[in-house]
Image: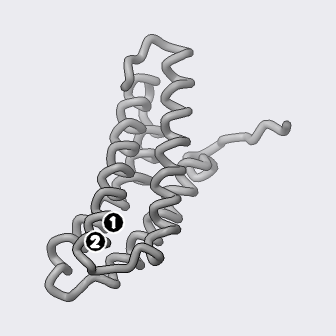
Amino acid sequence: MMDQRVDDYKDLIAWKRAMELTKAAYLLARMLPREENYALADQIRRSSVSIPSNIAEGYGRTGSKEYARFLSMARGSSYELETQIILCVDLGYIQEADTVKAIGLCKEVARILTRILQSLVSKQEIKTR
């Protein structure tokens, strides 16, 4: 297996998938009724943007503990976003079939971030859940 060189946060698979997720979330937010523009749609946009933003910010920090903290926040935001998307379906705002890509990316990003966090934990004594 070839080692992939990471020279920048934009080289991280987690960041790339999180950016895809953000785009998918923005498309879903556009499908919501107008009365949700400043409530649920806004929350979806904010939580989705938080994921790649925290990955990037954590990458730019100086220590493993700080990096882990930002990755943990990004993972939490992916769960938050997944919950908001599920709520949209439950409220009848969007069809479940329209959420497949975004939900899949939420799960993928969370798995990737979990693996990175586990790797950081094995290298350092960083506590995670």
Residue that numbered label 2 is attached to: 88
How would you rate the neighbour count of disc 1 (Cα within 10 Å): few for under 14, some for 14-19, many for 20 or more?
A: many
Q: Position of residue 54 (x, y in %)?
A: 38, 46
Q: In this view, which residue lies farthest toward the right?
A: 1
Q: Is residue 81 above or below residue 3?
A: below
State the SS at label 2.
helix
Q: How is the image coloured?
A: one colour
Please name the residue shown 36% across and 60% down the image. Answer: 48
98 or 109, nearer to the observer: 98
57 or 17, nearer to the observer: 17
Quarter of the figure that contains the C terminus: top left
Residue that numbered label 1 is attached to: 85
State the SS at label 1.
helix
Please name the residue shown 43% across and 32% down the image. Answer: 67
Q: Are marks 1 and 2 in contact (CB under 8 Å)?
A: yes
Give amino acid for label 2. Cys
Q: CA distance from mark 1 to mark 2?
A: 5 Å
